[in-house]
Amino acid sequence: MSTSEKLYAICKHKETGEYHVFPTKKNENDKCVFVGKASLCGTMNTDERDGCLASCRTTEEIREKAASIGDKICGNCMKIIYKTEEE
Ligand SMILES: [Zn+2]
C-alpha cells in the first residue's frame, strides 16, 4: 500500500569496517537496487562496500538492525534515518 515508503540498505565499508546506510528501491523486477551511489551521510559510495547486511528495509527495520551492529554504524547516517521518521 505505502509505495512511497523509503527503503534502505546497510553496507560495510571495505577499508574502515564501518557500516553506512544507503537509499535503495525495488525495481520493476522486484529486485533491490541502489538509488544513486552515495551513502546517506555522503562519505561512502557503493563501490567501497564489502557486502551489505540488509537491503530494501524500512526505516524501522534499519533502526533495529543498526542497534544490533552497535557503534560500528555511522552516526551521521543514523541521524538521517531518525530524521526521516518525523516527516
Ligand atoms: Zn554514513
Image (spheres, rainbow, N blue to C red):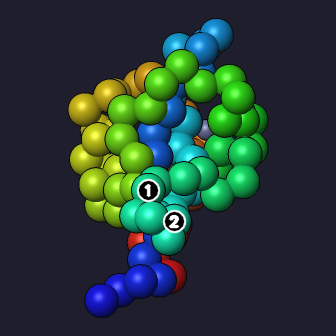
Report whether 71 appears left or right of 22: left
Residue 27 bears which disc, if any? Answer: 2
Where disc 1 sits, the SS reads: loop
Instruction: Please report the residue visible at 64 percent of the width from the left and 10 percent of the height from the top.
Output: 15
Q: Which residue is mark 1?
A: 31
Q: Please report contact status of discs 1 and 2: CB closer than 8 Å, yes or no.
A: yes
The picture quadrant for ligand 1 comes to: top right
* Residue 38 visible, this angle: yes
Q: Count the marks.
A: 2
Distance Cα–Cα, label 1 vs label 2:
5 Å
**CB at disc 2 and ligand 1 closer than 8 Å:** no
Quick check: 57 above or below 55? below
Provide residue 71's location: percent of width, then percent of height.
Answer: 41, 25
Provide residue 56's location: percent of width, then percent of height.
Answer: 40, 55
* Residue 59 visible, this angle: no
Instruction: Please report the residue visible at 33 percent of the width from the left and 50 percent of the height from the top.
Output: 63
Quick check: 77 above or below 4? above
Classify residue 7 by image quadrant: bottom left
Name which residue type carries label 1. Lys
Where disc 2 sits, the SS reads: loop
